[in-house]
Amino acid sequence: MTVSQGTSEFASARATPDDELAELLRDPQIRASLVTIATHAPTIAWALSAADDLLGRSRAIAEGINEGVIQLRGSATSGEFGGAARLGKVLIKGSPAIEAILASAVLQPEVIQVIGEFGEAALEADQQTRGRRRRVSGIREVLRLLRDPQIGETVAFVAEFAKALARVRARTGKVTTGGEG
């Protein structure tokens, strides 16, 4: 063993996890990755929560799928399946409302995600307020609430949604542009 090897081994033996972390944080690529992770932390947290919920329900989901497969097998052997399939095709092809839904943006994954978020928020708000006497009274309390970044972000979303809905309705001829007094 040379003197430099002995010194190197001694230095690495004294290195702490903090030293290793500091070395990693000097790397610009690692720092950029950490910024990306921090920026997407709410989305990552939501995805982890959804995955945890899915895993928690996996047994019930698997049992439901299994029961459905058993029912389909039974229907196919008894001749019921063909009739149900034909009925489904008639309903889908024959219903203008169903055709309109299938052709619209309602079933886009992004729209479904936003609707899911609205539903989740509605349930959470209901749980937080059910049975409690809380009300917002007066402009001062409204202004105080608007200083909350979450409420401000939500109000901005609602305002943008209202503008976008007005544009869509104007494009489709559902509403006239211009104010009513």
Image: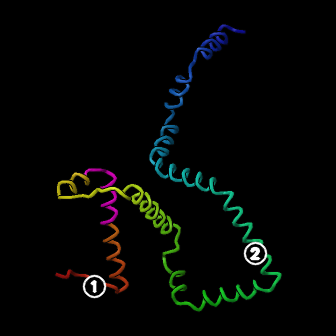
| In the image, residue 155 lies in the stretch drawn in magenta | yes
- Residue 167 on image: x %, y %: 33, 77
Q: Main secondary structure of the magenta part?
A: helix
Instruction: Return the residue found at the far top.
Output: 3
- Disc 2 or disc 1, which is closer to the eye? 2
Q: Amino acid at mark 2?
A: Gln
Closest to the observer: 30 or 166? 166
Instruction: Return the residue found at the far right.
Output: 77
Closest to the observer: 99 or 15? 99
Quadrant of res 179: bottom left
At mark 2, the secondary structure is helix
Q: Quadrant of the N terminus?
A: top right
Instruction: Provide the residue span drawn in magenta.
Output: 147-159
Closest to the observer: 162 or 144? 144
Residue ID for mark 2: 71
In the image, residue 74 above or below residue 9: below
- Residue 84 on image: x %, y %: 70, 85
Residue ID for mark 1: 176
Residue 107: mark: none
Q: Earlier in the sequence, mark 2 or mark 1?
A: 2
Q: Is residue 3 left or right of residue 74?
A: left
Q: Amino acid at mark 1?
A: Thr
Quadrant of res 118: bottom left
Mark 1, Cα crowd under 10 Å, few <14 / some 14-19 / many 20+, is few
The residue at 40%/60% (across/down) is: 126
Q: CA distance from mark 2 to mark 1?
A: 51 Å
Mark 2, Cα crowd under 10 Å, few <14 / some 14-19 / many 20+, is few
At mark 1, the secondary structure is loop
The residue at 29%/56% (across/down) is: 134
- Residue 42 on image: x %, y %: 46, 50
- Residue 73 on image: x %, y %: 80, 76
| In the image, residue 19 lies in the stretch drawn in magenta | no
